[in-house]
Amino acid sequence: MLVIKQNKTQVTALEIRDTPLNEGEKLYVVCWTRKIESGLQRVYEFEYFKTVGKRILLKDVIVPDQFGGLSGAPVIDENAKVVGIVSGRTADADSKKTYFSPSSIIELKSFLDKLEINK
């Protein structure tokens, strides 16, 4: 695990959101895809549909032609708070549709909170 003791850069760490997502809420992925590796970072837009287990199902709004290479990128809300981490797609059992489905940040936050308590 990486521990930052001093941050002498101008980079600010993203904060984790601690409130529930709302259906229809706009969410964003900031990244580069495997096929687009140069230039400015891209911002892709999604709409929150629902949570299934540890996955948040998102509807595509403004997305890349190919998703490869996004894994590990943060999913943020309109206030730049992290809500998830890109990790794949999931088929919804109810609708049988496949959705972009990052992992919810809740599990990671719980893990990090336990580490902090055990210091």
Image (cartoon, rainbow, N blue to C red):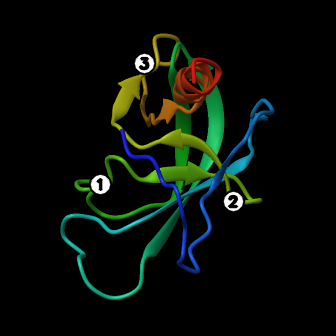
Q: Tag 3: Cα neighbours inside 10 Å, few (<14), some, or many (≥20)?
A: few
Kindly indicate whether the residue at mark 1 contacts the one at mark 3 (C-beta within 8 angstroms). Answer: no
| Mark closest to the chain's N terminus, 3 or 1 | 1
Q: For the residue marked with disc 2, what is the amino acid?
A: Ala
Residue at which label 2 appears? 80
Place of residue 20 in the rendered image (x, y in percent of width and height, measured from the top left): 78, 29
Place of residue 40 in the rendered image (x, y in percent of width and height, measured from the top left): 41, 85
Kindly indicate whether the residue at mark 3 contacts the one at mark 2 (C-beta within 8 angstroms). Answer: no
Q: For the residue marked with disc 3, what is the amino acid?
A: Lys
Q: Nearer the viewer, mark 2 or mark 1?
A: 2
Q: Residue furthest left?
A: 35
Q: Which mark is residue 18?
A: none
**Which element type, helix, strand or loop, lies under badge 3?**
loop
Q: Along the horizontal axis of the image, is 109 left or right of 23?
A: left
Q: Quadrant of residue 84?
A: top right
Q: Along the horizontal axis of the image, is 23 left or right of 36?
A: right
Residue at which label 3 appears? 96
Residue at which label 1 appears? 67
Q: Along the horizontal axis of the image, is 102 left or right of 15?
A: left
Q: Nearer the viewer, residue 27 or 80?
A: 80
Q: Nearer the viewer, mark 2 or mark 3?
A: 2
Picture residue at 58% right of the left edge, 80% below the top? 10
